[in-house]
Image (tube, rainbow, N blue to C red):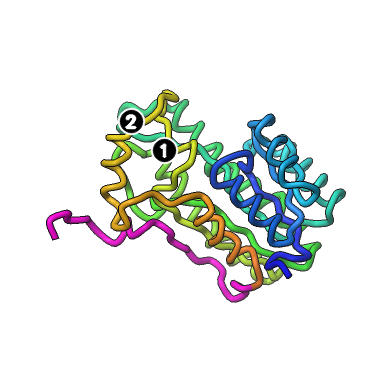
């Protein structure tokens, strides 16, 4: 038996990286998974590889109509969803607050914050119809603490953390649990490039990983397994909570001389 047998899941940003790992793991654990992205060729390839338990559809998480269509198609194909993973996001770093343009700021906010709001808004009614379920919102260590040069990203991830708590209060009466995951230093295509799309050097990556007590980034399946726990009935009494998977990043400052 799989840990998600009989469940129907929607996963955003599932064409690559952490989202792809969640799609593959959820399907392997028995869920029917509908996943969206704006990277259509990659998304279709993942769906073809996973097989009949996964279905790809185009999904711009900032578009209310796209969300309505995604929920309707999920319900039509597999039944009403009882799992939602709001995984889609973009990263902007290395730009000071005063040098951050309003256009760039709002792009990050619209995808990372508004996208999560719309996902919960349009999926919750179908989840209530399904008799309850679990919403997993992917935040970040940036949703727990500030980091220089990440004003838009940090603002968006703190908002995800706050919306998670509010949704948990409102949806608990319907048997819907809402939790947030706060990864730190995950090795994905999103974190491998800077704001201009250029590859980040190994030297810069090593400097970033030196902040992590475990001395390495997480791999996407490590975060996917935490999402699996929260999506499954194993976490039946967890709601409105933060789950941190950061290799010890938030524990304090690493002193290499000790």
Looking at the image, the residue that sits furthest to the right is 76
Q: Residue at x 51, y 50 (%)?
A: 220
Q: Is residue 42 left or right of residue 182?
A: right
Mark 2 vs mark 1: which is more N-terminal? 1
Report crowding for label 1: few under 14, some 14 to 19, many 20 or more residues within 10 A (C-alpha). Answer: many
Count how many numbered circles sit on residues in the image: 2
Q: Residue at x 37, y 39 (%)?
A: 151
Q: CA distance from mark 2 to mark 1?
A: 23 Å
In the image, residue 247 lies in the stretch drawn in magenta: yes
Residue 245: x %, y % from top left:
43, 59
Residue 250: x %, y % from top left:
32, 58
Q: Which residue is mark 1?
A: 152
Element assignment for label 2 = loop
Looking at the image, the residue that sits furthest to the bottom is 237
Residue 206: x %, y % from top left:
29, 41
In which quadrant will I find the C terminus? bottom left
The magenta span reads 234-258
Q: Is residue 204 left or right of residue 229?
A: left
Residue 195 picture quarter: top left
Q: Which residue is mark 2?
A: 201
Element assignment for label 1 = helix
Residue 140: x %, y % from top left:
44, 51
Above or below, 99 against 202 in this view is above
Can I make out residue 67 in this image? yes
Main SS, magenta residues: loop
In the image, residue 31 lies in the stretch drawn in magenta: no
In which quadrant will I find the N terminus? bottom right
- Tag nearer the camera, 2 or 1: 2
Above or below, 15 against 248 in this view is above
């Amino acid at each position: 038996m799989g840990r998600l047998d009989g469940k129907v899941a929607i996963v955003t940003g599932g064409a690559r990286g952490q989202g792809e790992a969640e799609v593959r793991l959820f399907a392997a654990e028995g869920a029917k998974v509908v996943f969206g992205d704006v990277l259509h060729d990659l998304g279709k390839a993942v769906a073809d590889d996973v097989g009949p338990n996964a279905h790809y559809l185009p999904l711009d998480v900032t578009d209310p109509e796209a969300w309505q269509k995604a929920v309707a198609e999920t319900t039509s194909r597999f039944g009403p969803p009882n799992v939602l993973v709001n995984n889609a996001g973009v990263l902007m770093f290395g730009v000071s607050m005063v040098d951050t343009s309003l256009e760039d700021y709002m792009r990050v906010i619209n995808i990372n914050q508004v996208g999560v709001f719309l996902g919960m808004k349009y999926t919750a009614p179908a989840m209530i119809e399904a008799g309850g379920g679990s919403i997993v919102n992917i935040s970040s260590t940036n949703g727990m603490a500030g980091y220089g040069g990440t004003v838009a990203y940090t603002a968006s991830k703190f908002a995800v953390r706050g919306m998670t708590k509010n949704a948990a209060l409102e949806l608990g009466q319907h048997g819907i649990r809402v939790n947030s995951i706060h990864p730190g230093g995950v090795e994905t295509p999103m974190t491998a490039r800077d704001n201009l799309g250029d590859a980040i050097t190994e030297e810069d990556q090593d400097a970033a990983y030196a902040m992590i007590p475990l001395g390495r980034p997480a791999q996407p399946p490590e975060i996917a397994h935490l999402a699996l726990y929260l999506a499954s009935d194993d976490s039946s009494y967890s709601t409105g909570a933060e789950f941190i998977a950061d290799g010890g990043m938030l524990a304090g400052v690493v002193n290499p001389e000790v």
